[in-house]
Image (spheres, grey):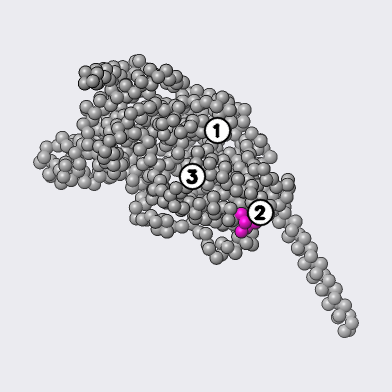
């Protein structure tokens, strides 16, 4: 019996050993198979397609000289920059292919000003930062649902990423292509460092409908400043390079043991506003950031077939406040890559099919995506796109640079111009980080060619800091447009700082919301409180010059003077022999106002000659 029992134990031991060996081999096989099949069927976007349908043209690639042998499993880092999502993210799809370990990283640049500082240069206001931190928290939550996590590094990426390459034994870095000049420069430096570290770098285009580089080649390397011409180019490009979506990533390999240990010690969590030096009480943006919220908002509007089909941007209302607005408020989600512009485009096309008849560009909902492409293309194709000097498509206009003009800029920025409609818009921008596009038109025109004669570059900087949807290409492009420096040239069309707001909100509810000092001012006077009799001002507890500033300029005379200045600048541009492929001012549209501008320009020139 003892010998039988001993034999039985030996057999069981051998059996257990065989089973353990089998399970170990099976685990290895499954790990390898999983790493090769992390591209599961779409989960978030109904129009996503399997990887096999992605053409080479749909997923352009860039790599460094260092290359991982095909099929070899590799420790991978994915550097999140703008593509802060898991759906339709071609560069993330590329990252998980053949990844033995995966390290999702976002780097908040808190380095001292002077390099590529992201936080301490003052270019990121509290609402914009709050939206970003919301987005990172949401991204981290979505990664955790896939048994991964977001590693948030703080410091200069040119220092933090190379340190992580070595510490975590990274052999491949994946990222989304970005077209802003400073990120292009930063990426080139990272590629040099990566090559020295033996790290392969791969990148994919996913932030725009078309690759700006491909569009540039189609355009012969030239900028295109007319929207209709650009749309023809884009249509042709999308026909040649069909838009195919990347599959959703639904599984991600774990971190390397070295990274796990470091993450346990240092946490690398998403920081709070206070930890980054912001005052949380100043954050008032009513729209939470993140992929989850962005897709929820997208699906909400795509379900409103009739609304999408009849949408016309100029007919939306700039004086709204609260959670519900007459536009989608998807711009900050597109800017930060929480929502794929490609998914938006595809799903909108499906909605149009259901509707049948729908509005058309340049005012339709589709056109809002096309305008985005328009500015991205031009920003990529034009040197010095975000400034006047050295910018070949920008009119050279002698904007005011005196201390008085600086005071005007500060009053405009802080909502102290004495024009309630303008001031209420600027207060909304400061408090919420959001401003309707027509309100942006009004305040931009007022600052530049309309009333204050301050450079559009100064206004662009304020918007860059405060808008939650601040987008370098769109911000610079729109400021050039609204100042009549490029794209739009009918400088004799000017927004009234009184009549324009009154058209949408005759009772002044928007003004009372953001300028409570005027809450008791009668509607008759609320857009021009300086015209109210003193007794009415006293009764409303808002005496102009005491409780609320008097107008900083007189619009009736100032905008006419500025028309003359614009006319002179345009004449100088023409005399210099400059040629544009732009829309010329129509001789019929605003002819009287244009003539007034020309007469004032001639009169001013005559006075200068007499003075000389």
The stretch in magenta equals: 165-169
- Residue at the spot of label 3: 336
- Closer to the chain start, of discs 2 and 1, is 2
- Residue at the spot of label 2: 75
Please state which of residues 307 and 205 is positioned toward the viewer in this rendering: 205
Q: Residue at x 30, y 32 (%)?
A: 400
Please state which of residues 548 and 340 is positioned toward the viewer in this rendering: 548
Q: Residue at x 21, y 21 (%)?
A: 611
Q: Is residue 317 left or right of residue 349?
A: left
Q: Position of residue 145 (x, y in %)?
A: 57, 56
What predominant SS class does the magenta segment belong to? helix
Residue 261, numbered label: none
Q: Position of residue 560 (x, y in %)?
A: 25, 25
Question: How many numbered discs, if any?
Answer: 3
Q: Position of residue 375 (x, y in %)?
A: 47, 32
Picture quadrant of residue 452: top left
Residue 212, numbered label: 1
Disc 3 packing (10 Å; few <14; some 14–19; many ≥20): many
Is residue 607 among the parts visible in the rendering? no
Disc 1 packing (10 Å; few <14; some 14–19; many ≥20): many
């Amino acid at each position: 019996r003892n010998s039988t029992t001993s034999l039985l134990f030996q057999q069981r031991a051998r059996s257990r050993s065989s089973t353990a060996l089998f399970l170990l081999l099976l685990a290895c096989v499954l790990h390898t198979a999983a790493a090769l099949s992390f591209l599961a069927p779409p989960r978030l976007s109904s129009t996503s397609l399997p990887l096999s349908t992605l053409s080479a043209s749909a997923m352009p690639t860039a790599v460094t000289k260092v290359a991982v042998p095909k099929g070899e499993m590799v420790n991978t880092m994915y550097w999140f920059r703008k593509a802060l999502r898991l759906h339709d993210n071609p560069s993330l799809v590329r990252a998980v292919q053949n990844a033995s370990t995966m390290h999702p990283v976002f780097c908040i640049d808190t380095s001292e000003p002077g390099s590529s500082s992201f936080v301490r240069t003052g270019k990121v206001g509290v609402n914009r930062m709050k939206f970003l931190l919301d987005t990172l928290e949401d991204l981290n939550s979505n990664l955790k649902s896939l048994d991964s996590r977001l590693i948030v590094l703080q410091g200069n990426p040119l220092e933090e990423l190379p340190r992580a390459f070595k510490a975590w034994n990274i052999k491949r870095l994946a990222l989304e292509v970005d077209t802003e000049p400073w990120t292009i420069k930063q990426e080139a430096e990272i590629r040099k460092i990566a090559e020295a570290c033996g790290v392969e770098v791969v990148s994919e285009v996913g932030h725009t409908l078309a690759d700006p580089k491909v569009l540039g080649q189609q355009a012969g390397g030239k900028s295109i400043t007319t929207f209709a011409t650009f749309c023809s180019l884009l249509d042709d490009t999308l026909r040649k390079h069909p838009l195919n979506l990347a599959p959703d990533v639904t599984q991600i390999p774990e971190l390397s043991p070295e990274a796990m240990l470091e993450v346990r010690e240092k946490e690398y969590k998403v920081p709070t506003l206070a930890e980054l030096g912001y005052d949380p009480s100043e954050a008032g943006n009513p729209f939470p950031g993140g992929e989850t919220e962005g897709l929820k908002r997208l699906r909400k509007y795509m379900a409103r077939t009739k609304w999408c089909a009849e949408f016309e941007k100029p007919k939306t209302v700039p004086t709204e406040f609260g959670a519900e607005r007459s536009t989608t408020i998807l711009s900050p989600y597109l800017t930060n890559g929480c929502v794929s512009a490609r998914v938006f485009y595809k799903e909108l096309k499906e909605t149009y099919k259901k509707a049948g008849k729908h509005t058309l560009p340049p005012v339709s909902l589709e056109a809002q995506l096309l305008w985005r492409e328009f500015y991205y293309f031009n920003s990529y194709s034009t040197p010095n796109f975000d400034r006047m000097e050295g910018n070949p498509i920008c009119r050279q206009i002698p904007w005011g640079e005196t201390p008085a003009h600086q005071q005007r800029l500060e009053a405009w920025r802080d909502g102290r111009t004495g024009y309630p409609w303008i001031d209420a818009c600027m207060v909304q921008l400061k408090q919420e980080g959001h401003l309707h596009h027509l309100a942006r038109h009004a305040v931009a025109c007022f600052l530049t060619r309309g009333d204050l004669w301050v450079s559009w570059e100064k206004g662009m900087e304020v918007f860059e800091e405060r808008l939650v949807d601040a987008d370098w290409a769109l911000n610079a492009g729109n400021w050039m447009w609204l100042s009549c420096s490029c794209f739009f040239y009918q400088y004799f069309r000017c927004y009234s700082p009184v009549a324009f707001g009154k058209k949408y909100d005759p009772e002044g509810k928007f003004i009372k919301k953001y300028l409570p000092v005027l809450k008791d001012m009668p509607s008759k006077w609320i857009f021009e409180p300086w015209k109210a009799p003193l007794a009415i001002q006293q009764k409303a507890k808002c005496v102009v010059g005491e409780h609320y500033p008097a107008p900083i300029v007189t619009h009736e005379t100032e905008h006419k003077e500025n028309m003359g200045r614009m006319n002179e600048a345009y004449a100088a541009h023409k005399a210099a022999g400059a040629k544009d492929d732009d829309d010329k001012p129509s001789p019929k549209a605003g002819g009287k106002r244009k003539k007034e501008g020309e007469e004032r320009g001639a009169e001013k020139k005559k006075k200068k000659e007499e003075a000389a």
